[in-house]
């Protein structure tokens, strides 16, 4: 059948040529220009607003199996950004501590905090910046994912499975928001911060996040008293008392700071807690004033 079709087509062309006839209406004799152009190949780009059953450190396509956020999952992509400029010109994805990593982290920091309704560090949350795999990067991929997860507690960073989106998750009254605690100390180190209701007996309360200056982790460790002093300022603002030299006689401070790798990747957020060791509190001190937090 294929041979007969070809012969018939040739015969028809010859017949038209011998008859000296023009092409039928709508036929321009060009056998190639009516085929649609083949679309350009599109590189894979992850989506924002989807959830993942597992945590990905590297964005391998083989591990990209998104699920609906009402299904059980362990992370959620709240933003997808694109690296540009010198950070995008390198031959491999950004490494820990690189300018590319810090650039992406800064963008993720702002976008994720906006999505959850407050600084994400003010809740039991963990931010991950995910870059394409090396082969995908070599193929031109320059995206990065801003993934957020719920963790068990301040001291236990294991990821908790969820069945709901984290958008708006730090609205007032959210169970994810950091609140009141009973610290367990060993000398000057915090072994555990046991969360309790602020109406229960407690000795510490979260007051906010201080964004530390862009210094090295080693310098931060050498000068950690700067963080405590900065947290005193947040305590004063939170309780509504004067931020002066009397603050050291009103409240102690507890800080939680990023690990070294998190710090070098651009996370400078220090979590600040007021700490009253010599008496028991049974309500939040937010806006409570000098009577609730007197000079002692």
Image (tube, rainbow, N blue to C red):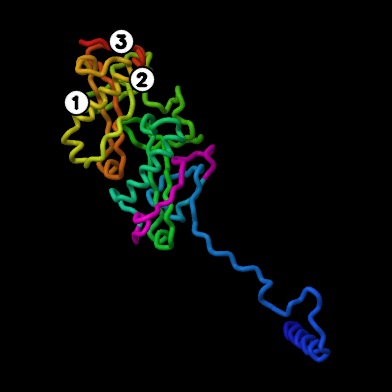
Q: Position of residue 248 (x, y in %)?
A: 20, 18
> Nearer the observer, disc 3 or disc 1?
3
Stretch in magenta: 67-92
Quadrant (top left/top right/bottom left/bottom right) for the N terminus: bottom right
Q: Residues within 10 Å of mark 1 (few under 14, many from 20)?
A: few
Left or right placement of residue 95 versus residue 35 in this view: left
The reply to whether callout 3 and callout 1 are in contact (CB within 8 Å) is no
Question: Does residue 40 sit above or below 214 in this rendering?
Answer: below
Of label 1 and label 2, which has the lower sequence position? 1
**Magenta span includes 81:** yes
Q: Which residue is mark 3?
A: 292
Question: Does residue 187 sit above or below 40 in this rendering?
Answer: above
Give the alpha-carbon distance from disc 2 to disc 3, as whole Å: 19 Å
Q: Position of residue 74 (x, y in %)?
A: 44, 40
Left or right placement of residue 84 versus residue 259 in this view: right
The reply to whether callout 1 and callout 2 are in contact (CB within 8 Å) is no
Identify the residue at image location x=19%, y=18%.
245
């Amino acid at each position: 059948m294929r041979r007969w079709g070809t012969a018939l087509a040739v015969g028809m062309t010859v017949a038209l040529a011998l008859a000296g006839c023009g092409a039928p209406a709508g036929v321009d004799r060009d056998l190639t220009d009516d085929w649609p152009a083949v679309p350009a190949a599109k590189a894979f780009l992850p989506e924002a607003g989807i959830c993942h059953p597992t945590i990905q450190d590297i964005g391998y396509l083989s591990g990209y199996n998104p699920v609906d956020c009402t299904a059980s999952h362990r992370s959620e992509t709240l933003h997808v950004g694109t690296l540009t400029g010198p950070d995008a010109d390198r031959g491999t994805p950004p490494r820990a501590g690189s300018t590319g990593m810090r650039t992406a982290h800064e963008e993720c920091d702002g976008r994720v905090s906006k999505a959850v309704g407050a600084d994400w560090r003010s809740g039991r949350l963990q931010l991950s910046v995910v870059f394409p795999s090396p082969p995908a990067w070599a193929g031109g991929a320059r995206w990065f994912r801003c993934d957020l997860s719920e963790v068990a507690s301040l001291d236990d960073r294991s990821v908790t499975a969820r069945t709901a989106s984290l958008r708006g998750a730090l609205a007032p009254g959210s169970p994810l928001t950091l609140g009141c605690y009973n610290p367990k100390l060993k000398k000057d180190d915090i072994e555990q911060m046991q969360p309790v209701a602020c109406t229960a007996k407690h000795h510490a309360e979260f007051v906010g996040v201080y964004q530390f200056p862009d210094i090295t982790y080693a310098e931060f460790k050498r000068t950690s008293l700067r963080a405590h002093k900065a947290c005193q300022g947040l305590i004063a603002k939170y309780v509504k008392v004067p931020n002066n030299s009397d603050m050291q006689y009103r409240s102690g401070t507890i800080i939680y700071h990023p690990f070294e790798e998190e710090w070098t990747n651009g996370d400078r957020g220090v979590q600040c807690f007021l700490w009253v060791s010599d008496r028991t509190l049974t309500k939040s001190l937010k806006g409570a004033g000098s009577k609730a937090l007197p000079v002692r």
